Image (cartoon, rainbow, N blue to C red):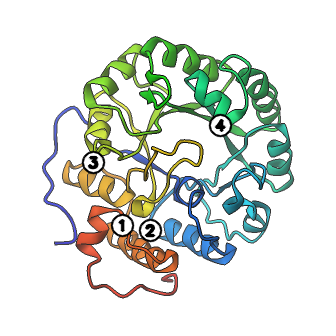
Amino acid sequence: MREPYRVAEAGLPERVTVYEVGPRDGLQNEPVMVPVEIKAEFIARLAAAGHRVIEATSFVRPGWVPQLADAAELLAGLDRVPGVRYPVLVPNERGLDRALEHGVQEIAIFGSATETFAGRNLNRTLESQFEMFEPVVARALGHGLRVRAYLSMCFGDPWEGPTPIGQVVAVGRRLLDLGCFELSLGDTTGVGTPGHVTALVEAFGGPSRLAVHFHDTYGQALVNTLAALRAGVTVVDASTGGIGGCPYAESATGNLATEDLVWMLHGLGVETGLDLESLVETSTWLAAELGRPSPSRVVRALGAGRAPDRHVKE
């Protein structure tokens, strides 16, 4: 079986946008440097599989995330497919400058819902992070760019414990008020549970302009996603092959695997526009390039014994 049996569940969205983060959030924590040619092929394969949003890279300082030091080279040689968005992550105004130089049309900023992680990840306090974001968002909007906001540690922080829901909402609303079109609620260390997800979405007053970004540290990523869908969320971040993690939070394991998400969504009768077979082929190929098996359960089930395809299909 290459697709699940479909049984629609009442109350779920008819269609979900999968915001693919594999080329950026997925690869950023890989210990072995991935050649820029492999990254470009990865992105091309994702577009060929039906993705319409692929976060390509990040303009962070190379010393912070060496794996993404080739961002400019990657974007310069990227074969963009019409109708596909290729956002990039930027940490500050210098990152925005570089994004503008390379004709980027959409960016993302990344904030923290907790004091400790703001210090570790941004070298800022919970309050002073906004002094960094405000000019970035204002200038980006002035240049006609769309701006997304990530918010980390929305469910719990390994240093501070559970993150108060009111604190998450306060920080998240400030990011939206800057002019960000979307806020991605991140479970950076994977400690969230379905009831917590529902309560957080409700505390924001509903799912409008919200996306979710789950890590599978405790095996809760899919059930948390289902809770978000039942609450009305229609944008879900995922990483093909389940690769990824956060270099500034040691307990953050891999992202929700795109294939595992698509298997569940298709089984629920929710459309994604994605070809599961192509995604499995891509993850099998990528696993061979990375020299380790894919963490995705669906890839392991459907890709068992499959030789990696070395080239993008026409």
Of labels 2 and 1, earlier in sequence is 2
Q: Which of marks 1 and 4 is in front?
A: 4
**Residue 29 in the image, given as x and y percentages of width and height:** 57, 57
- How far is disc 1 from disc 3 in space, using C-alphas? 13 Å
- Reading the image, the residue beneath label 3 is 270
Q: Residue 49 carries which label?
A: 2
Q: Position of residue 136 (x, y in %)?
A: 79, 32
Per the image, label 3 sits on a secondary structure element best described as loop
Mark 4 vs mark 2: give the one in front. 4
Q: Do the residues labelled 2 and 1 touch (CB within 8 Å)?
A: yes
Distance between the Cα atoms at labels 1 and 4? 35 Å
- For disc 2, the neighbor class at 10 Å (few under 14, some 14 to 19, many from 20) is many
Say which residue appears at 59% left-offset and 43% top-offset. Answer: 248
Q: What type is the residue that disc 3 sits on?
A: Val
Q: Residue at x 25, y 40 (%)?
A: 223
Direction from residue 135 to residue 243 in the image, left or right: left
Residue on which disc 1 sits: 275
Residue 246: percent from the left, percent from the top? 54, 47
